[in-house]
Amino acid sequence: MAVYRPTMVFTHLQSKEQNKPTLQTIEQTNTDTKSVSRNDRHILVSAVGEVCLQANNCRITISVTAKKDDAKDARSSVSRRIEYIQQCLNNYGIKQNDRDIYERLTRDGRFYVMRTEITAKFSDVIKCQSLSNLLVEKLDQNVDISLPEFFHDDKDIESLRKQASLLAIHNAKLKAQEMAKLVHMEVGRTISIQEEETNENYPSSSDISPSVHQRKLDAVLTVSSKVSVQFELKKKNKQRS
């Protein structure tokens, strides 16, 4: 769930006339609102919208290593374990496009060292935990499983960007309405919207925590959007009796 944070809003009033009145000038002269044309005044508001979301996806890397006199034996030893791991991933519903495999054969003196890594992505942290524990239980010490790394997928990030922009526009309109009330006017149609700045940040941390719980807490993406919105500023309609 996205979290909405308080925002900063900046506002000023403008006119198409050569001598642009300040807010104070408008307040002093608004007693004669009939002389104000709906087409020669507008309000320009800069506002910031900020949303944050905790990552609900994670990935682990499963490494299998074998050291043998013969390269073929090293590959065969790793292959048997990889087949079992792949079958477990199938059983847990992890699709092929959510897996990456990297193989490397090296030499250590007279020995051949075969190392294969499988990176698997999960949208369910409990499922990731269950599979990790199963592999540790069933396989030997030549298999190493990393702690989960939490991340946001592209859809989550794009959704946060849109939410931040829409929230900034919403905040701009609210502030424009508040400012318009001060001068006994009201906000009309939207004239223009311009996104000035967008920022995406994770909590700053110099070290990666060994705690899975803390890793998840640290994987919070905050997206902020600053927009400038220009609204029509018009005289208030008198309420009907």
Image (spheres, rainbow, N blue to C red):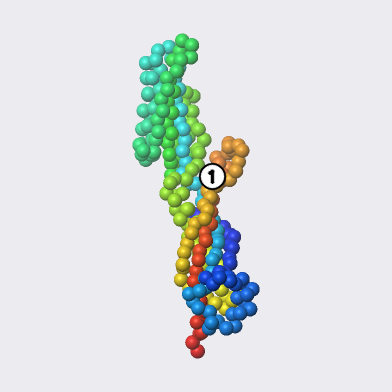
> From the viewer's perspective, is residue 92 above or below residue 38?
above
Q: Amino acid at mark 1?
A: Ala
Name the one closer to the observer, 223 or 189. 189
Residue placed furthest toward the front: 18
Taking 167 as reference, is 233 above or below it?
A: below
Q: Position of residue 131 (x, y in %)?
A: 44, 36
Would you say 55 lies left or right of 102 here? right
Q: Residue at x 52, y 53 (%)?
A: 197
Using the rendered view, name the quadrant where residue 48 is placed.
bottom right
* Residue 169 position in % (x across, y down): 50, 62
Q: Identify the residue at image location x=53%, y=50%.
A: 199
x and y, in percent, of residue 232 in the image = 49, 71
Question: Where's residue 88, x and y in %?
Answer: 38, 34
Q: Check disc 1 and report the residue beneath it.
A: 219
Helix, strand or loop at label 1? It is: loop
Q: Is residue 216 above or below residue 241?
A: above
Can residue 3 be seen here? no
Badge 1, how many Cα within 10 Å: few under 14, some, many 20+?
A: many
Quadrant of the image occupied by residue 64 = top left
Residue 150 drawn above or below residue 170: above
Q: Nearer the viewer, residue 169 or 50?
A: 169
Q: Residue 211: which quarter of the image?
A: top right
The reply to whether residue 38 is in sight is yes
Depth check: give the residue in front, 227 or 20.
20
The residue lying furthest to the top in this view is: 110
Q: Residue at x 55, y 61 (%)?
A: 47
Foreground: 168 or 98?
A: 168
- Residue drawn at x 58%, y 59% is 7
